[in-house]
Amino acid sequence: MLRFQHSEYLWALTLLLVLQLAFLGVSWWKRRSIRRIGDPALVEKLFAGYSRKLFVFKFLLIFLAFFFGVLGLANLQKGSRMEKITRKGVDVVIALDVSKSMLANDIQPDRLTRAKQLISKLMDKLDNDRVGLVVFAGNAYLQMPLTIDYSAAKMYLSTVSPEMIPTQGTAIGQAIQVSDEAFNKKERKHKALVVISDGEDHDETALQKTRTAFDNGVVTNTIGIGSVAGSPLPDPETGGYKKDREGNTVISKLNENELKGIAAAGKGIYQHLDNNTDDVVNTLVSKIDSMEQKEFGENVFTDYNSYFQYFLGICLALLLIEFFIPEVRLPREPRETTVA
């Protein structure tokens, strides 16, 4: 099994695009400057030894060095020893609302970002519990099945955005059904569901799906995010706020009644998430820890071989090669001629 020990460093690879754009910008600036001076062919002759090929080659070396350097920092590892570990915990599925109403900023910086921060803190508090992730808007999808790999779970969480589900709405009922199906069907306990939503659109099937899930052993907790007074939704296309067909500003309001009803039907708890996430996380963890836990064994890698040194070695070698390559072509020495 291959993995990156510090997978968060891989985001630095996006800087390669910035590096490429910088190279194109400098190349464009150089060509423009030469054209301003005069005829490009004549002007380039004035710069003795200038080589565009060397300029491109040196940039390519820096580009590759940065790439391998980031891989080295992320530390590619391969599992070397597998052991069966017995754990005690519960299965926790988190259903996250990713509809565009979650972009409202009545909670800073916005509802979705604050919800993702809460989930990340919740994962930090969970020890031996397996965690899964369901995302929903107008439809619901299992984004990540149950796992104890919290690093992978956080990677999945970081990719969540409203664009991943084109159908808008708040299909909480479908999210609860998909979450119920993600659990082990043979068990009737050790299951906790956490629904995080503004509950804006009323879902008539939500209570029925919650009761069905409870019959299957799922305790459903809900977290309401947003304000009851509501907040306008930002419109990225206009830079202002979204408006309806009549030209009125769209206001997104938290529907606490629906979320409280779901929590009651699922024998769980309801909490309102404001700018303080720690209290919500601690209360939720206490609720999960109070549930009956199960023992389960899993084969996991306990030892890993690291290969960061190879990537960093390649990075250093490329930088040294780039350093010793001259920026200009060295002049050729004239050949000696002999006179008979």
Image (cartoon, rainbow, N blue to C red):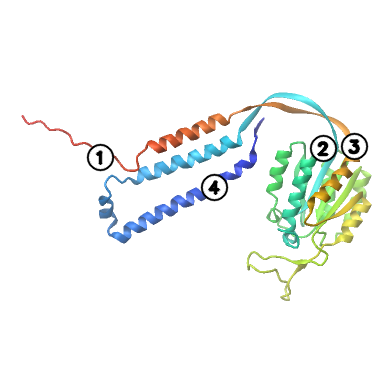
- Secondary element at image label 4: helix
Mark 2: amino acid: Asp
**On the image, numbered disc 2 is attached to which residue?**
129
Q: Quadrant of the C terminus?
A: top left
Contact? badges 3 and 1 (CB < 8 Å)? no
Q: Relative to residue 306, is residue 160 drawn left or right?
A: right
| Image quadrant where residue 91 sits | top right
- Residue 142 visible in the shown view: no
Label 4 neighbourhood size at 10 Å, few (<14), some (14-19), many (20+)?
few
With respect to residue 16, does 226 lie above or below? Answer: below
Camera-nearest residue between 151 and 100: 151
**On the image, numbered disc 1 is attached to which residue?**
331
**CA gap, disc 1 and disc 2:** 68 Å
- Secondary element at image label 2: loop
With respect to residue 199, does 82 lie above or below? Answer: above
Number of numbered labels in the structure image:
4
